[in-house]
Image (cartoon, grey):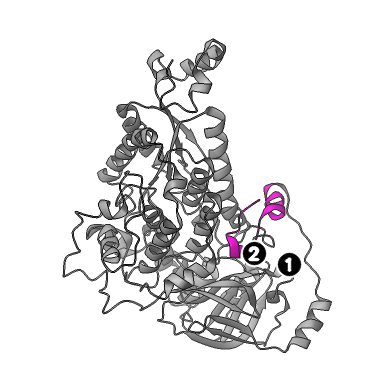
């Protein structure tokens, strides 16, 4: 048997000694001629756990069809997903970021174990996408990513964030039980990832800018015929990648990551992109730091008026042409590296050559002379509260300076109880600590408390600080990923009620206005909380690193 284009699978199926392997594969549908074809794994994140992923089995079949028609032999396998939207506000949310690592590890395990020559991965929910990309970078064999697609809007342009914010409005007496039920019942109509520029759509767009997805594949609705076509085309593209030996690390260069960061900023994307791009870069062996976001953010404006801070949904951006016209605009302005190579085998500039501009009457993507924000909404803050850095999401609508008194809570549950009972007031800085990668463990997202604050009408009147994360759906004056985290004795652990805190998004500073001697005294009396985790959380806590470097496990 020839091993051309079968660098890995030939070791599995060639030769007399591999007859048992071939016998096993015949049982799962291999024909004689299939042993001569490159084998490609189709990593499916299908699950009925969440609407984000409930349709991905169909997309995996379409991708397999495309791969088979091109002359490959596809093999579909599954990995896990955890729904942020369902687990939010509970202990279950601790497993969300952990799932990113499990997904990466499981894909690596199957691809290496089965000797696949190429990999196509399909992700829907937030952690699926970086998990798939981390595996691709780690394996470094021909690979392509397909996004499961965005959900269609609910009734009256509602989405999952509408429900979270309705909870706060209900607790404030602004809406009735019946009105809350109406939002709950109609906000999520079917398959697809959350419909604003939240983490899923942010990461899908970033991955396309990285060059690991086909052009505009990140801007398609989950239930559209074009999404299935996208999967078929991606499957077909794998053979070309194998023929060219075009592997992820040849695409995931520093320029590619800079392109991704520029896209995240221009779209007003999620703070989680910082965490995930750092983790992908780590696996790709590319030097990337949180300070790169500051450097690039000084010259890239926010141009997309998309939820959560803006007015429009992803489905509405799709309707006007998706993200490729925006990419073309950024390229023309010198804000993207056009020579970065992509999975098409062409450069980014070549991919965008025939892309037409948005229509002049659209209002979703702003002009450079009238941006949503003249520089990045993602601010990397330092100061005595965050010596190793923190990530803020400042749209500008809430201002760029906040000074207030600390209201510290040692868990999300404690903070949520205080919010719902009306104990948070204008001028408060709500601190939620011991929610970092190790302290959680798992670095939960704080969508429930921030949405409740919004629903109560306090969104521009209070600030949030946490060593945990914020959902892509979070908006307001929020600062997360504070490092070092409280569990390790970081300064956040030393904050007491009433302490003055200053957040300056112009100077990129977050400061606790308490003298050094007082902090030293508090540190001597501080004790690390007892670890109560077990199983996968215990393993994760022992292996995970700082949020400032992507919270990767080593």
Residue lying furthest front: 339
Residue under the point 52% across and 80% down: 508
Q: Residue 156 in the image: x percent, y percent?
A: 30, 65
Residue under the point 73% across and 78% down: 494
Observer-nearest of 348 and 533 = 348
The label number, if any, that marks residue 488 in the structure image:
1
Residue under the point 61% across and 61% down: 443
**Spatial CA span between label 1 and label 2:** 9 Å
- The residue tagged 2 is 436
Observer-nearest of 155 and 322 = 322
Residue under the point 49% across and 67% down: 292
The span shown in magenta is 536-554
Single out the mark in the foreground, 1 or 2. Answer: 1
Q: Residue 311 in the image: x percent, y percent?
A: 32, 71
> Could you say whether the residue bearing mark 2 is in a helix, strand or loop?
loop
Quarter occupied by residue 364: bottom left
Q: Is residue 493 left or right of residue 164?
A: right
> Which circle's residue, 1 or 2, is located before the other in the chain?
2
Q: Quadrant of the N terminus?
A: top left
Above or below, 113 relative to 305: above
Q: Residue 341 in the image: x percent, y percent?
A: 36, 50
Magenta stretch: includes residue 550: yes
Residue lying furthest left: 360
> Could you say whether the residue bearing mark 1 is in a helix, strand or loop?
helix
**Cβ atoms at labels 1 and 2 below 8 Å apart:** yes
Above or below, 345 relative to 70: below
Q: Residue 488 in the image: x percent, y percent?
A: 73, 67
Q: Residues within 10 Å of mark 1 (few under 14, many from 20)?
A: some
């Amino acid at each position: 048997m020839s091993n051309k284009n079968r660098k890995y699978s030939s070791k599995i199926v060639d030769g007399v000694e591999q007859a048992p392997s071939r016998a096993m594969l015949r049982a799962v549908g291999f024909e004689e001629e299939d042993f001569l074809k490159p084998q490609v794994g189709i990593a499916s994140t299908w699950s009925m756990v969440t609407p984000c992923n409930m349709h991905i089995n169909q997309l995996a079949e379409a991708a397999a069809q495309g791969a088979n028609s091109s002359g490959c032999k596809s093999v579909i396998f599954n990995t896990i997903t955890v729904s942020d939207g369902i687990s939010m506000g509970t202990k279950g949310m601790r497993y969300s970021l952990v799932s990113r690592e499990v997904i990466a590890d499981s894909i690596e395990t199957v691809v290496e174990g089965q000797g696949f020559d190429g990999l196509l991965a399909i992700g829907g929910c937030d952690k699926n996408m970086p998990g798939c990309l981390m595996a691709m970078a780690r394996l470094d064999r021909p690979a392509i990513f397909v996004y499961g697609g965005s959900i269609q809007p609910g009734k009256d342009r509602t989405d999952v964030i509408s429900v979270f914010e309705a909870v706060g409005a209900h607790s404030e007496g602004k809406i009735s039980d019946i009105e809350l039920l109406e939002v709950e019942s109609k906000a999520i109509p079917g398959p697809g990832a959350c419909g604003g520029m939240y983490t899923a759509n942010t990461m899908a767009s970033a991955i396309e800018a990285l060059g690991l997805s086909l052009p505009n594949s990140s801007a398609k609705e989950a239930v559209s015929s074009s999404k299935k076509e996208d999967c078929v085309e991606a499957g077909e593209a794998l053979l070309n990648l194998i023929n060219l030996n075009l592997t992820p690390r040849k695409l995931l260069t520093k320029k590619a990551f800079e392109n991704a960061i520029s896209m995240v900023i221009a779209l007003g994307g999620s703070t989680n992109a910082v965490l995930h791009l750092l983790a992908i870069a780590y696996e790709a062996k590319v030097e990337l730091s949180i300070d790169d976001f500051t450097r690039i953010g000084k010259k890239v404006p926010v141009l997309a008026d998309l939820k959560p801070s803006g007015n429009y949904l992803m489905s509405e951006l799709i309707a006007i042409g998706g993200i490729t016209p925006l990419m073309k605009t950024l390229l023309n302005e010198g804000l993207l590296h056009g020579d970065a190579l992509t999975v098409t085998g062409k450069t980014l500039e070549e991919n965008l050559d025939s892309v037409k501009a948005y229509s002049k009457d659209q209002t979703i993507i702003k002009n450079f002379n009238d941006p949503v924000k003249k520089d990045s909404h993602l601010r990397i803050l330092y100061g005595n509260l965050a010596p190793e850095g923190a990530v803020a999401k400042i749209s500008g609508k809430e201002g760029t300076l906040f000074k207030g008194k600390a209201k510290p809570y040692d868990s999300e549950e404690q903070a949520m109880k205080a919010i719902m009972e009306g104990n948070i007031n204008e001028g408060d800085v709500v601190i939620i600590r011991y929610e970092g990668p190790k302290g959680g463990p798992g670095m939960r997202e704080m969508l429930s408390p921030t949405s409740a604050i919004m629903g109560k009408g306090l969104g521009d009147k209070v600030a949030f600080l946490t060593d945990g994360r914020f959902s892509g759906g979070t908006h307001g004056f929020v600062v997360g990923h504070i490092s070092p985290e409280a569990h390790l004795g970081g300064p956040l652990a030393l904050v007491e009620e009433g302490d003055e805190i200053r957040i300056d998004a112009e100077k990129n500073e977050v400061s606790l206005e308490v003298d050094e001697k007082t902090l030293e005294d508090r540190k001597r009396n501080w004790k690390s909380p007892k670890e109560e985790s077990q199983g996968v959380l215990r393993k994760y806590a022992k292996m995970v690193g700082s949020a400032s470097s992507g919270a990767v496990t080593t």
